[in-house]
Image: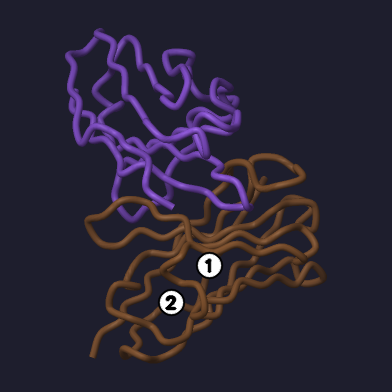
Amino acid sequence: EVQLVESGGGLVQPGGSLRLSCAASGFTFSSYWMSWVRQAPGKGLEWVANIKQDGSEKSYVDSVKGRFTISRDNGENSLYLQMNSLRAEDTAVYFCVRDIASRAYGSSPGYWGQGTLVTVSS
Amino acid sequence: QSALTQPRSVSGSPGQSVTISCTGTSSDVGGYKYVSWYQQLHPGKAPKLMIYDDTKRPSGVPDRFSGSKSGNTASLTISGLQADDEADYYCCSYAGSYAWVFGGGTKLTV
């Protein structure tokens, strides 16, 4: 059974940093594109970042480029999101997501973790 | 990276059918066979995959849910509406350059 468990969320001041982690199990982690998707309170889903199986390719939504960094450790079956220069508009539940299938590029969000809440406020 | 366009709300009576549209461009919806649909019962909780690769249904999803696409517009049709189908529904498409784009979401009222 695919399991994705996020951690690291919490309250942070504007301009601060936070590192989210996602522990994966139940599948061959190194075979899948992985992603972060977020949902602000009362808003819709927003894709944040994707990372290729070996970490050689990464992609970000424009609003986080230069501030967020996605990374992975295939030996530890873990996905990370380093978030710097946080803004109030980054407040959201952040979901760790696995691609639907093992493909050459991330095609669709298939499996979702339960999410971790990040609140940016003074 | 503009969001895909979905109606804000749709409604139907039990037993009826409803269709939710998802309009993008030739750079996303129309350019790839990677449109997926999600049901979210409670905001902030994990969405559930209902349709992927435009038309495929994961195991365990009732065949009342079906996906289709024409040009730059994808659609999710739910037939035989049930009360527990009431939820928010989101579409998502691969958008090239290893990126995804979501629709704004549609609230289904049964």
Instruction: Give the quarter of the figure containing the C terminus of chain A.
Output: bottom left
Q: Is residue B101 left or right of residue A73?
A: left
Chain identity for the colour purple used in the image: B
Q: Colour of chain A?
A: brown
Image coordinates for residue B83, horizontal then vertical, percent:
24, 23
Q: Is residue A84 left or right of residue A21?
A: left
Mark 2 crowd level (few <14, some 14–19, many ≥20, 10 Å Cα): some
Amino acid at circle 2: Gly
Residue A6 badge: 1
Asked if badges 2 and 1 are on one and the same chain, I answer yes
Q: Assign a secondary structure to mark 2.
A: loop
Name which quarter of the figure residue A93 lies in. bottom left
Mark 1 crowd level (few <14, some 14–19, many ≥20, 10 Å Cα): many
Seen from the viewer's position, the closer of residues A48 and B48 is A48
Circle 2 sits on which residue?
A9
Seen from the viewer's position, the closer of residues B31 and A60 is B31
